[in-house]
Amino acid sequence: APLTLELAADESSPPPSLEITLLSGCSLRGSFNNPVVEGRHEHLRLVGKGLLRKAWPDKDRSYLFEGLPPGNYTLLHFANAKLIGAPMEIRIEAGAKEVLLDINGD
């Protein structure tokens, strides 16, 4: 079974730090479960050493980052070019194949 992570943090708590075990060339996929806001364009940015990737949700509000090498990443949730919620720190190590994330909106 794929590893499933559900993340929730309130404004007073520090952003969650994740330890994730993955194979080189893994995929990170998940879905938005925050309410749809009319006219709001959401996307995710995954930032690592020498790497910046963006993912937009499809019609089912799912997203996918493919072919990620091991390393430390920061996952950012943007809507209309504004950061939503706290950045999430993700560490990818050799080991598992796929990670699913639920992104909680505010």
Image: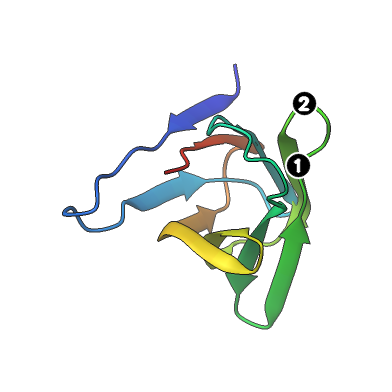
Residue beneath disc 2? 60
Mark on residue 57? Answer: 1
Tell me residue 12's x, y (percent).
16, 54
Q: Of the residues shown, which amino acid type is indicated by label 1?
A: Pro
* Contact check, label 1 and label 2, Cβ < 8 Å: yes
Give the farthest residue toward the front.
38
Tell me residue 60's x, y (percent).
77, 26
Image position of 100 with respect to 76: above or below = above
Q: Is residue 77 left or right of residue 23?
A: left
Question: Is residue 74 among the parts visible in the rendering?
Answer: no
Which type of secondary structure does the marked residue at label 2 adopt?
Answer: loop
Crowd rating for badge 1 (residues with CA inside 10 Å; few <14, some 14–19, many 20+):
some
Question: Is residue 78 among the parts visible in the rendering?
Answer: yes
Q: Residue at x 72, y 53 (%)?
A: 41
Tell me residue 87's x, y (percent).
43, 62
Q: Of the residues shown, which amino acid type is indicated by label 2?
A: Asp
Give the farthest residue toward the right.
59
